[in-house]
Amino acid sequence: MNYNLKFILLLVLCCMSFNLQAQEYSTKSRKAISLFEQARITYSSTEREALLNKAIKKDKKFVEAYWALSQHVMRKNDYTKAIEILSIVNSPKFPYRAQTQYMIAELNFLKGDYKSAIAMAETITESSFIPQKTQLLIKYLNAQDLKDHPVPFDPTNLTTINTRFDDYFPSITADGSMISTTVLVKEAQFENQEDLYWSQKNGDTWQIARPLLPPMNTGGNEGSQSFSSDGRYMFFVACDRKEGIGSCDIYYAIRSGDRWSMPISIGAPVNTAYWESNPALSPTGDELFFVSNRPPSQGGKDIWRCDVTILENGFLKFSNAQNVGTPINTDKDDFAPFIHADNKTLYFASTGHNGLGLSDIFYARRTSKNTWSEPKNIGYPINTNGEESGFVVNAAGDKAYFASDHVEKDNKGLDIYEITLYPDARPDPMAFIVGRVYDATTLANLDAYVEIFNTDTSDKIYESVSDKKLGTFTAYLPPKGYFGINARRKGYLFYSNNIESMSDSLIIALQPATPGNKIILHNLFFAFNSAEIQSQSEKEIQYLYEFLQRNPKIRIEITGHTDNVGSEEYNQTLSLNRAQALFNTLQNKGIDTDRMSALGKGSKEPVSSNDTEEGRAENRRVEVKIL
């Protein structure tokens, strides 16, 4: 969906700074002009070449015919021949020499011969072209510097993933167990369509990629797909569907076991009458990056973002679409965003930032929610003078996947490659933890909303909905830090706990919201020997408040407990004061006092031994029971 770059750049070469239709031709030969005009409208490649050669034969100084013939040869990837043709008219004897020098310089750049591109650009002396000359030299010198300082590169062709067609836009789950690609299926000589393929890993080996079944794939174009970091959601782009808003729209599907739901259009304000593509969900699940050519635009295709709300039934709601702006977007095309599981490292492709050729991979770091560092070229030879895009990185940050047609130089088209990503370009490494949610009474697996947050800052780290069939979820967290987890589902008490070890599985039993069932508020914190609620408790209190708001008929009993350190009278008072502190906080938020009661039980009902600090910590708790 973005692989017409070479043709687009050819048009740029021939149209930038001059216009073939508007200018007066360099020849006065009516026959030469007639042949040239015929060549411009014919669909036959062979006929076009013959007509252009005839036009040149009629007037050997017909500059525009040489330009067009060079463009025609360039379509066959013959850079050398295209440059040879232009070199004929690179002389003071011919008009429009600066334009010719400009095109030769650009063709050398696209060929990857940056030294020749620099040398040619330096020969431009026409005063009106000095600004363009300066821009070219900056670009070429930057490309030569990148080539002179290569980064570590060890590409592996994913032979079981790649097909005999063009394969691009890889997407992986953050644990690296599932991959999806877009495949340009060539059904006949002039009939191509894009389909979604996917594969799972068996040990260290990828299984042979296979197309997704309908309704994901149809007779139309589907591609530019991406997984959510946990593999629960797949976003993709489909074109010309009857329910579509524009030419190409973004859809998503929800995974349940090994099956996908019917595709769901994400609708406005993301989809518009313009062109939308390249969706990528943030690891926190509350932000979607995508590409659009709608206004307002920095130029060409831009990277955009919008807010995402995960509803408790697993469906998604989209709002507040915004252009990401500078320094990410340029006056040319910026596309194929991928936000890593660290939620701050953005990889994307661009034809506007200084690169090595057609499109290059860049990365930038998030400095706040809507601001980014200056993008950095990921380097040569990951980037080449060809097309590189669709760059994705696993959660650990050490393996990357991307599409290229230049790694093996075998002229077979775009393939997916795996590389070990060098340290400077790596994101923050993330650890993953798996969990399962089930009904504490029936033991049936449940699809429940799951959120993980940093208990020190209350920042959201992860949110999703567990698998409807399996009850499972996979979360990605920084390897260090203190994290709380909350799970909730309609008709159940919410679940609250801390994540103590990344190696442990999270087994979450949700209690039905019926009288007698209770939960421990693991993320409600008090100052030492005090009933003062600490700021880190805000998330936990909000969860309880929202539960009571959603269930207006439920009444609760708040009970404080302590360990056995100190006198029973002291512990009794402290436990009651802590329960009362939560009672008062909920009252201040608007919960009717008739729906709550507060009790203190001191150290009378321990849940663990008071002989160890760990046991005493478990005994110091506040419980909420449904009355």
Image (spheres, rainbow, N blue to C red):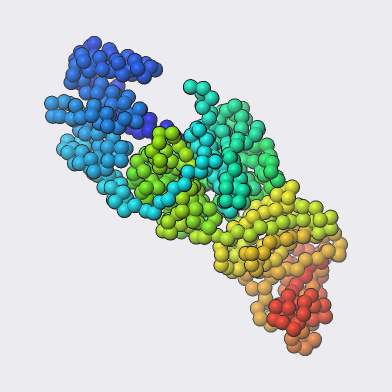
Give the x, y percent position of residue 204. 57, 51
Q: Is residue 457 left or right of residue 366?
A: right
**Residue 246 point in image, percent of width and height:** 54, 31
User: Residue, x 79% and y 81% (percent of image)?
Assistant: 603
Instruction: Kindly identify the residue that appears in the image at 66 percent across and 58 percent down.
Output: 434
Query: Residue sitting at 44 percent across and 39 percent down?
Result: 301
Residue 307 seen in the current view: no
- Furthest toward the bottom, the residue is 567
In the image, taking residue 583 as reference, residue 337 lies left or right, namely left
Left or right: 320 as drawn, with respect to 507:
left
Q: Which image quarter: residue 68? A: top left
On screen, residue 330 versus residue 270, left or right, reads: left
Q: How many marks?
A: 0
Residue furthest top as drawn: 31
Q: Can you say whether 64 is above or below 270 in the image?
A: above
Would you say residue 521 is visible in this rendering? yes
Position of residue 454 relative to residue 277, above or below, is below
In-front residue for pair 409/300: 409
Quadrant holding the C terminus: bottom right
Residue 389: give x, y in percent of width and height. 45, 42
Q: Based on the displayed image, in which of its 4 quarters is residue 441 positioned?
A: bottom right
> Is residue 545 shown above or below 221?
below
| Residue beneath the point at 70% across and 66% down | 497
Query: At which x and y percent is residue 96?
Result: 20, 28
Residue 33 sits in quarter:
top left
